[in-house]
Image (cartoon, rainbow, N blue to C red):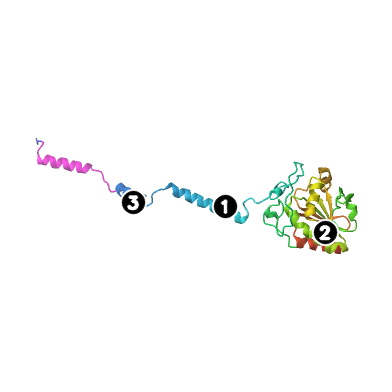
Amino acid sequence: MATHDDPDLERWVDARMAALDPDRTGEPETEGALAQLRVRATATPYRPVHAWLMAAGAAALLIAVLATVGGLPQNGSGDLADSREHDPPSRSLAGDGALAPPAYEWPSRPSDQEVGSGVALSARARASAPRLVPVAQRAEATGFTLPAMEGGNATLADYAGRVLLLNFWATWCRPCRIEMPWFLEFQDAFAERGLAVLGVSVDDDWDVVRAFLEQSPVDYRVALADTADRLAPFGPITVLPTTWLVDRQGRLAATHVGLVDRAVLESEIQQLLDE
């Protein structure tokens, strides 16, 4: 029997153990993979500030794109409350109290924020051609009776046989003040042909209107719709300025909401005068 130190026994044991050793050819090379991972981690360490800067840059790019395509909110949503952002009102149609009137002046040109007096920029595209309602489709203009500044009442019947430019305005409405010199010129140029201009103020009272017109006088007629009842015949007037053109037969031929396009309005007036 072989002893523990027998060389033959040791060789036999070594042979048996070698036969039991697993084949490692299919194992993944974990050491190599871990080494590559350590190299990459050292070259590009994670820094939270980098992620913050990337997020901020993406947000700035999104804001720029939205502003370019008109996706950001612009001044005004189409109501009287928004039209007061640039000029505090002396009144509101709801009668929420009077404020001091603004400094009176005739602005030479409007800014993008002022155009339309509450009409969104996307709705302010200027017309490239006159847009009169076809004669056969015109509805009768609503009759009205309003106190006139010179005394008495202004009524629709006063303008029978004439073309009427009916403008709704207020002393606190800056776009309204931009239009008024144009109406003065139209009155001077076309009065002999049958044009009449009537400005309907929606201010609280005559004191406010007279104070304004003392500083910026007009030579066309001015009336006052200072109550809901007086304004009611015209339907919902939610944006100032609003301008109607009424033909010689008392029919509504055109409606302009917001700051008018002067050239288009003048062309419409001349067409109505020629009818």
> What amino acid type should be assigned to the residue bearing mark 2?
Pro
Residue at the (81%, 61%) spot, across then down: 186
Was residue 19 drawn as part of the magenta stretch in this picture?
yes
Are the residues at dot 2 and dot 3 in contact (C-beta closer than 8 Å)?
no
- The x, y position of residue 86, in whole percent, is 69, 50
Q: Image check: 114 left or right of 63?
A: right
From the top left corner, tell me how far across and down residue 88 is, in percent: 71, 47
Q: Which residue is mark 3?
A: 39
Q: Nearer the viewer, mark 2 or mark 1?
A: 1
Q: Separation of disc 2 and disc 3 at Cα?
A: 79 Å
Residue 153, image x and y in percent? Answer: 89, 49
Residue labelled with disc 2? 134
Left or right side of 133 for 174: left
The kind of residue tagged 1 is: Ile
Kindly identify the residue that appears in the image at 35 percent across and 50 percent down. 42
Q: Which residues are magenta?
A: 4-27
The numbered mark, 2 or 3, whose residue comes first in the sequence reads 3
Q: Between marks 2 and 1, how big is the CA–CA gap? A: 43 Å
Please name the residue that numbered disc 1 is placed on. 63
Query: Quarter-wise, where is residue 246 in the image?
Result: bottom right
Q: Secondary structure at mark 2?
A: loop
